[in-house]
Image (cartoon, rainbow, N blue to C red):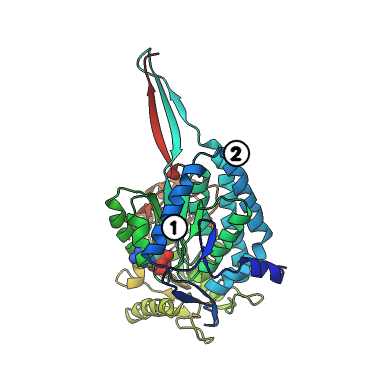
């Protein structure tokens, strides 16, 4: 169990810039709320453009030294950071549940998942290999050297307050870059706890900086337009991602965008139904349906449709909803009232257009921003829920009869992040996996994220990959050296 000293140490109500705990130049602060109770849990600086410019300058100064460190030095500091995150996992998880509402067991899971990127890139730091390419002339050598891209910015969402930061910052720091992070307004406390542990790990001043703000716009503008920033990495909504792409075009920044999803979850008639139900529950209800890889549309063969819907409804109705800090709770609140309103409007629209509610369908009797786990059948493509990301605990189940139809429905949105399907037929598995326009595919598996595999999307779900051996290259320039006169 974490001690109260642990909590005090990690609980910060200040930004972290150039190794110092700072307040906004304007002196403004904003309140951080617990979505399960509505209570104020902290006040943090409400930074603006000037604060962000300062942080960028400091990160730029720090880059001069950090980019010259050896891979072994960077690796050791990252490894220490990883160890400290794991040592404090319970205290960080409690902070996370308080600010974002997810059940404590899921928060502990996220701390481990988030820390795994720090561990992985502490190892990958040593493998930023260059190349020696056979030259076309006898008197020349062609060499390739990889170098850090420079100062990076990271703008992250509230649904994974720790993992979205480490998935970007660990490879950046491993590559020799320095970073300015703007965490989501709702979840700055986990980010600040990470900064405290970075300091304890011996991360030099200015390498990892955290700027908090009550709104993304002003800070985000600096982070996407400042000429000293060479790379921006964003996870969040497609709308904000497109804006940041436009804003970063003038200074031609490198970009990684992990945007919205609309994951199909296809169940073929030859699926192992027990596994499909387990996978559906795991994929749909993680973080109360608030992840970009959550199953968003169940697409089920007509021969197994009724059985799948019935079993999913029974399991959904049995979910324990409540405050994430309470024992046994499986579903926490949604992040805020606006999220509840959005989910309700999608459900109401579907019901008005003919959907049947098998279970749920309304805000939860607990009140606040709790919503009932919901299963809807008799869906059609005219309903808004067929196109929009739900980000809540709702399972709309569509029906299909041929493989071609299933693939067409699955590919019929502008998104292309994660997709899932269940089938035992190996020929069908290859055909469908190839035909789905998605960056990540779970085949007979509902939970696929790991630091060892490349995470990222196609189409309007974004560009770039995070984690895995591909993740480091996002923060490295490939420099060609032509050595002549030999
Ligand atoms: P969500 O709907 O999941 O909150 P957002 O895309 O709004 O997704 O938020 C993700 C991150 O983007 C947050 O850190 C948020 O503060 C930031 N953000 C929101 N609007 C802007 C903006 N105009 N410019 C830069 N960042 C922004």
Work out how far the residue at label 2 is from the one at label 1, CA to CA, in angstroms: 26 Å
Question: Tag on residue 55?
Answer: 1
Of residues 383 and 145, the one nearer the viewer is: 145
Could you tell me which quadrant the N terminus lies in?
bottom right
Q: Is residue 122 visible?
A: yes
| Residue at 33 percent of width and 58 percent of height | 244
Q: Position of residue 434 (x, y in %)?
A: 40, 46
Characterize the local packing of mark 2: few (<14), some (14-19) or many (20 or more) Cα atoms within 10 angstroms. Answer: some
Characterize the local packing of mark 1: few (<14), some (14-19) or many (20 or more) Cα atoms within 10 angstroms. Answer: many
Question: Tag on residue 33?
Answer: none
Question: Tag on residue 72?
Answer: 2
Ligand 1, seen in the image, is in the quarter at bottom left
Q: Is residue 235 visible?
A: no
Q: Is residue 258 above or below residue 172?
A: below
Q: Circle 1 — which element?
A: helix
Could you tell me which quadrant the C terminus lies in?
top left
Q: Nearer the viewer, mark 2 or mark 1?
A: 1
Q: Is residue 132 above or below residue 428?
A: above
Q: Position of residue 74 (x, y in %)?
A: 57, 43
Q: Position of residue 24 (x, y in %)?
A: 45, 68
| Residue at 46 percent of width and 52 percent of height | 59
């Amino acid at each position: 169990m974490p001690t109260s000293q642990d909590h005090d140490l990690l609980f910060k109500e200040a930004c972290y810039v150039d190794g110092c705990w700072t307040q906004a130049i304007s002196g403004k602060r904003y309140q951080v709320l617990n979505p399960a109770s509505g209570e104020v849990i902290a006040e943090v600086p409400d930074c603006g453009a000037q604060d962000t410019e300062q942080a960028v300058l400091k990160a730029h100064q720090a880059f001069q030294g950090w980019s010259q460190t050896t891979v072994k030095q960077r690796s050791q500091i990252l490894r220490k950071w990883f160890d400290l995150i794991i040592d404090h996992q319970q205290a960080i998880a409690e902070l996370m549940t308080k600010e974002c509402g997810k059940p404590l067991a899921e928060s502990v899971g996220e701390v481990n998942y988030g820390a795994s990127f720090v561990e992985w890139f502490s190892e990958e730091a040593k493998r930023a290999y260059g190349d020696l390419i056979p030259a076309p002339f006898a008197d020349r050598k062609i060499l390739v050297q990889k170098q850090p891209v420079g100062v990076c910015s990271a703008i992250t969402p509230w649904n994974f307050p720790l993992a979205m930061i480490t998935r970007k910052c660990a490879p950046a720091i491993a590559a020799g870059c320095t970073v300015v992070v703007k965490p989501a307004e709702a979840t700055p406390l986990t980010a600040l706890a990470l900064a405290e542990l970075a300091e304890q790990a011996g991360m030099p001043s200015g390498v990892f900086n955290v700027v908090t703000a009550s709104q993304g716009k002003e800070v985000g503008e600096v982070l996407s337009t400042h000429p000293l920033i060479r790379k921006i990495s964003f996870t969040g909504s497609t709308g904000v991602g497109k804006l940041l792409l436009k804003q970063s075009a003038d200074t031609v920044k490198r970009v990684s965008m992990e945007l919205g999803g609309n994951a199909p979850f296809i169940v073929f008639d030859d699926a192992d139904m027990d596994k499909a139900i387990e996978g559906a529950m795991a994929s749909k209800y993680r973080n109360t349906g608030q992840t970009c890889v959550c199953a968003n549309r169940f697409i089920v063969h007509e021969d197994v449709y009724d059985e799948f819907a019935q079993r999913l409804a029974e399991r959904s109705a049995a979910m324990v909803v409540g405050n994430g800090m309470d024992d046994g709770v499986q579903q926490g609140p949604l992040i805020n009232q606006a999220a509840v309103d959005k989910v309700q409007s999608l459900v109401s629209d579907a019901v008005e257009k003919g959907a049947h509610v098998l279970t749920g369908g309304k805000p939860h009797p607990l009140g606040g921003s709790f919503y009932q786990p919901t299963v809807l059948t008799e869906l059609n493509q005219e309903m808004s829920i067929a196109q929009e990301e739900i980000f809540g605990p709702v399972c709309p189940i569509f029906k299909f009869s041929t493989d071609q139809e299933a693939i067409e429905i699955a590919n019929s949105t502008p998104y292309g992040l994660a997709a899932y399907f269940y089938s035992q037929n190996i020929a069908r598995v290859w055909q469908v996996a190839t035909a789905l326009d998605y960056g990540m595919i779970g085949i007979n598996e509902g939970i696929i994220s790991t630091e060892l595999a490349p995470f990222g999307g196609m189409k309007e779900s974004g560009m770039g990959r995070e984690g895995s051996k591909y993740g480091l290259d996002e923060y490295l320039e490939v420099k060609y050296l032509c050595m002549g006169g030999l």
